[in-house]
Amino acid sequence: MVLTNWLNQRFTDGEPEIEVSAGTVRQLIAELDGRFPGIGAELEGGMAVAIDGEIFPDPFLEPIRADSEVFFLPPLEGG
Amino acid sequence: MRYEAPRAIEEAVALLADAEGDAHVLAGGTDLLVLLRAGLVTPALVVDIKHIEEMCEIAQADGGFRIGAAVTGAEFGEHAELKRAWPGVVEAMELVGSTQIQGRATAGGNLCNASPAADCVPAMIAAGATCTIAGPAGRREMAVEDIATGPGETVLGKGEIVVDFLLPPRPPRSADAYLRLIPRTEMDIAVVGAGVNLTLDDDGLCKDARVALCAIAPRVLRVAEVADALIGSAIDDAALELAAAAARAACQPIDDKRGTVEYRTKIAGVLVRRAALIAKQRAGNGS
Amino acid sequence: MDIEAPSYKWVGTRPVRPDGIDKVTGRAMFGADFSLPDMLTGKILRSPHPHARLVSIDVSKAAALRGVKAVATAADIPEIPVDNAFVGDAPTNFRHWSSNVLAREKVLYDGHAVAAVAATSPAIADAALALIEVDYEVLPHVIDVKDAMRDDAPVLHDDLFTAGVEPKPDKPSNVAKRVEFTLGNTEAGFAEADVVVERAFRTKAVHQGYIEPHAVIANTAEDGQSQVWCPSQGHFMIRAACAKLLGIEISQFRVFPAEIGGGFGGKINPYLEPVALLLSRKSGRPVKMVMTRAEVFRATGPTSGAALTVKIGALKDGRIAAAEATLTFEAGAFPGSPVGAGCMTGFAPYDITNVKIVGYDVVSNRPKCCAYRAPGAPIAAYGIESVLDEIAQRLDLDPIDFRLKNAAKEGTKAAYGPQFGKIGCIETLTAAKDHPHYGAPLGPNQGRGVAAGFWFNFAGQASAAVNVNEDGTAIVTYGNPDIGGTRASMAQIAAEVLGIDYDKIRPIVADTSSIGFNDITAGSKTTFTAGLAVHEAAKDVVGQLRERAAKMWDISVDAVVWENGVARPASSNAGDFDPLALADIAAMAGKTGGPISGHASLAATGAGPTFAAHICDVEVDQDTGRITVVRYTAVQDAGRAIHPSYVEGQMQGGVVQGIGWALNEEYIYGSDGRLQNPGFLDYRIPVASDLPMIDTVIVEVPNPNHPYGVRGVGEVPIVPPMAAVTNAVASATGVRMTELPMSPPRLLAALENGS
C-alpha cells in the first residue's frame, strides 16, 4: 500500500509504503484510519486509487488481493 | 430605429442631413451590424445605400475605373479587367473577412469605418485613387488618403457620403501589390499591411511609385520616402533595403493585443520589400 | 502487431451516423434552437472588476421595470457549507460552484456573474441589468500564476490554506494545494547521467473554443415540476448540479439533452442552467438564456496557464537516468486546476527509475478553470517532450528511437505509481517511425518534430436499454450526450451482438427521467462505458430471444443458440427447426411473454490507458516569425476502433486544438485585470485554411477489459501537438521556444535573440 506524498508526511511519519491487510478499499481505509487517526477522512475525500495498476476514480468496494499494490492518487477528471 | 433604403444619392444625403440623433450609413453591414448587436451603437436612423445603383457598379471611364462605394469584395474579385489593371487593389479588398463576408463587405465601408488597419485603403492610396463625396452642398472629389483622420474619424460632415472610388488610367508597365501580415491565413485583422504601386520604364527602372502602409499609425499613411527610395532604381536589394528602412522610419504604431511597436515596425519593412518585388514582377510581365 | 483481429460484422465499419443528416442540414436542435410559448429572456449582470467585495446589490429598480418577471442574486440560492460541498466522491466542489454561478461576498474575475434577470424581451432584460445597482469595493487583483504565489499577492480566499504541506500553513494564500510523486532517487540518477537538460516553460490559459455557446431553457409548472433543455456533457450532471446548487429534490425536475456543439471538457460544469431554473421557478414562466461569445470567454472554460520546469538526465546509450518536473498551474478563481493529472501523465510514456514531480494548484483573478481534453496532460507533455527532444539531439539519437529505448510496456511501473497492464506505447511509437512521413524530405525553412503523449482514460456509471420493436427493428436508449458519434457506435455494438443490420437500430439519447443514471460524456469514457452497458443490454435481449425461441419450439432454452441474428437449435438432438430471425420472434412477443426489452446498469472499470505519437512538419518565415504547419501525422492506440472515422475525427480535432494552443491561442489580460480578447477575432483558433489535412494512423492493441478491446480515444490526441510543433520549430530554426503561444512576434524576437 502506498500513500501519496503529502499524506505520509502528515500521518505516517514520512513512511510512504505501508503493509496493510484488507479485502476491499473500504476495509483498507478503515484499517489505516485505526493506525493513523484522521487519515480516513483524507482518503475518503475524493481521492482515486490504483489497485495493481488499474485506476478507480470513485473507490469503495473494489477487491484487494493479499499481494495487491494500492496507490492513493489525487482526484482526476477527464475532459 | 428608423430604416431607410433610398434609390438615389441625393435622397440618401437628404435623409442623413436631416437626421436627428445618431444616423448611420449601412453598406455591407459587416461593421455596423456587429456594433448594433453588441449594443455599442444605438442609431436613430440607418440609411441602407445598397439600393442606389450608382454606388453598386464598377465602370471603366476615361481609361480608368469608377467603383461604387457599395461594391463588395466578391465583385472586385469577379471583375477581370479591374483585376488585370489593379491586382493589388483587388487582392487587398479580397482579404477583408472570409468568403461569406466578401459577399457583403464593401470598399466604401472599409474606408469610412476608418480603421487604421483597413486592408483596401493602403492599396487605394498607393493606386492614387480619389473618391467622390456627395453632401448637402453638392459633390466634391478628394484623395483617398485624406478621408480618414484617425481611428473611426473621417473628414465627412453631416449628410456626406462617399459615392465612389476613381482609379486613374494606367501607364504601360505598371502594377500594384498588397500584402498584410496576420497570424492566421484569413478571418483576421492586419498586424501590418503594405500597398505598393509601380510604373517601370523601358529599361525596367522604377519610373514612378506610390506606397502606403496600414496598422502602423492612427490612420493609413502614404509614405513618400519609401516611394522615393524605389524611384529611379532597378528595385534591387539596395533600393529595397532603403525602402524598407524608410517604411520602418515612417511607423508610429501602438502596442496592443495584435502586435507590438517593435514587431509592427520590423514587419512594415519586410512587407514593403516583398510587395515591391511582387509589383515589380507584375509590371515587368506587362500586366 | 501479433494480435489476431477477430472478424466482426459491424465493429470496425464506417456507417453514416444516425444524427448526421440532421446536423448537416441544420435540422438538429442545439441549445439555442429551442423556444416555448410565453418564454422570457434571461440575462446575467457580470462584474467589470477582476477582484472586488460586493458591498451591496440593489435590484429594486430592475425588479420594478415593466416586463421584468424575476431577478436573482446569490441571496436566492442556499449557501453550501464547507463540509457539504461535495456530492459523493466526485471532485466537484459545489460550494465553489455556487459562488461561481452567482457571486457571493466577492467577485473574483472580470465577467463573474453577479445577478440575473428574466424579462419579456431581450431589450427589457438589458435595460433591467442596467438598473441593478452594485456597490463594489474594488480590491487589488492578481492575474499571473507566479505573481499569485508571491507573499505580498492579494489573497482571493481568506479560508484557503495550502493543502499537502506540513505543517499546515498559518496564513491563507493563493496556493491551494501541493502534490508530489516520487519514484527512486533522482539525485543519484542525475549523478550518473551523461547529459542533463533543464528548462523552464510557460503556457497561457486557453479556451475549449466550442462553436456553440452555452444555452438553456428552463420551464416550471404550477405544481413546481420543472423541465430543462440544454446542451451539456452530461444531463445527469446538470441535474445533480441544479439540485445541489438550488437545494431542490432530483424528482422535482427533468433534464433533456439538446444536441451539443462541442464541449471538450468545458460543458461539464453548470453555468446558466441553475440560474435559468431559478428564474423559471421564481417567474413561473419558461426562461431562455444564451451566452454571447464574450460571456463564453470571460466566464466559462478555460484550462490553466502554467509555469513549469523540467530537468531530465540521460546516459550516452539513451537510457533516461532521472527526471524531475515542477508544474505550477492556474486554477482561476477557485481551486481545482488539473495539476495532479499533469504530474501523473507527463512521464507516463516512459520507464524511468528515478522520478520526482511536484505540482502546485494556484488561484488568481481569472475565470474558474475547467476541464479541457486530457486536462493537464498537454501542458506537462509540452515541457517534458521538449526536453526529451533536446536530449536526443545532444546524444545524436533519433528522437523516436530515444523514446522507444525508454518506452513503457506491460509491467512498467508508471512514474505516478501503479504498474501498467497491456498497453500500446511501443506499438504506437513504432508505427510513427515506420510511417512514410517520418522519412520524407523537408524543404527550405522547414523542420520536423515528434512528441508522444499519454492519457489514463476513465470509466464510470452507465445505463442502457435495448427495446425490440414488433417489426424486428430495435431502439437503443442510453444516457450520454453524443458529442463524438457515439450514437453510431452504440448502434454498431447492438447490431454486432444482436446480429441484425445497423440500419434496423435507432439509437437515442434519453433524458434524465427515461433511463438510469449515466456519468458525463468526458474522460474518453463514453464508447467504453456506455458501450459496455449497450453490450450488456443487447446480451440481455439475446437471452430473452433464446427463451422465446425455446418457447416457440417447446424445447429447453439451453438447446437454443443465437448466431448471426437467428435462433437455431444447439444441435440436431434438440430437434429439427427452421431458424427464427429476430423479426420472427419479435412478431410473436405478445404471445410468448410480452415485450422484449434488455437493460443494463453498471459501474464499468478497466478503461485501458492510451498512447499517441505525433509527427509535425513546419515551415518558418524567418523574416516575420510566422509558422505554417505543412504536414502532420497522428498515430494513436485506439484498442479497437468501433467506428474508425470517428476515431480519426477525434484525433484530427485534438491535433487542431493542440496546434492552436501552440501557435496563437491565449487569454490576454490588460493591467486592469480585464480580458482583452473575448472573441474569435483576437482569440485565434486555427481556421481551416491554416492547416494541412491531419493524417491519422490507428494502432489497435486491444484493451483486455473490454469485449471488443475498446480504449478511450478522445483526449490523448491533444497531448503531443504543442511539443511536436515546438520541436519542429526547433528543427527548422535552431531556436527552442519555451513560451506558448509561439505567435509571430514572440518567435521573431526569439529568432533575433538566437535563444
Image (cartoon, coloured by chain):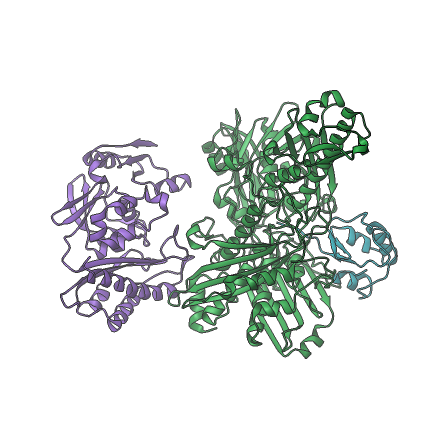
Chain colours: A cyan, B purple, C green
Q: Is residue C415 above or below residue B47?
A: below
Q: Considering depth in this image, is C121 or A56 the residue closer to the camera?
A: A56
Horizontal side of residue B111 vs C497, given as left or right? left
Query: Image point 61% across, 32% down: which residue?
Result: C504
Horizontal side of residue C714 vs B213, given as left or right? right
Horizontal side of residue C246 vs C666, given as left or right? right
Residue C414 appears in the figure: yes
Q: In the image, residue A56 lies at what x, y percent?
A: 74, 51
Q: Is residue C525 above or below residue C473?
A: below
Query: Image point 16% across, 45% down: which residue?
Result: B60
Horizontal side of residue C583 vs C211, given as left or right? right
Q: In the image, residue B224 lies at what x, y percent?
A: 21, 63
* Image-quadrant location for residue C175: bottom right
Query: Image point 35% across, 66% down: which residue?
Result: B266
Q: Is residue C494 above or below residue B165?
A: above
Q: In the image, residue C219 lies at what x, y percent?
A: 59, 28
Q: Considering depth in this image, is C422 or C155 the residue closer to the camera?
A: C422
Q: Considering depth in this image, is B199 or C178 the residue closer to the camera?
A: B199
Residue C249 appears in the figure: no
Q: Is residue B176 above or below residue B47?
A: below
Q: In the image, residue C406 lies at what x, y percent?
A: 65, 68
Q: Residue furthest top?
A: C591
Q: Residue furthest left?
A: B62
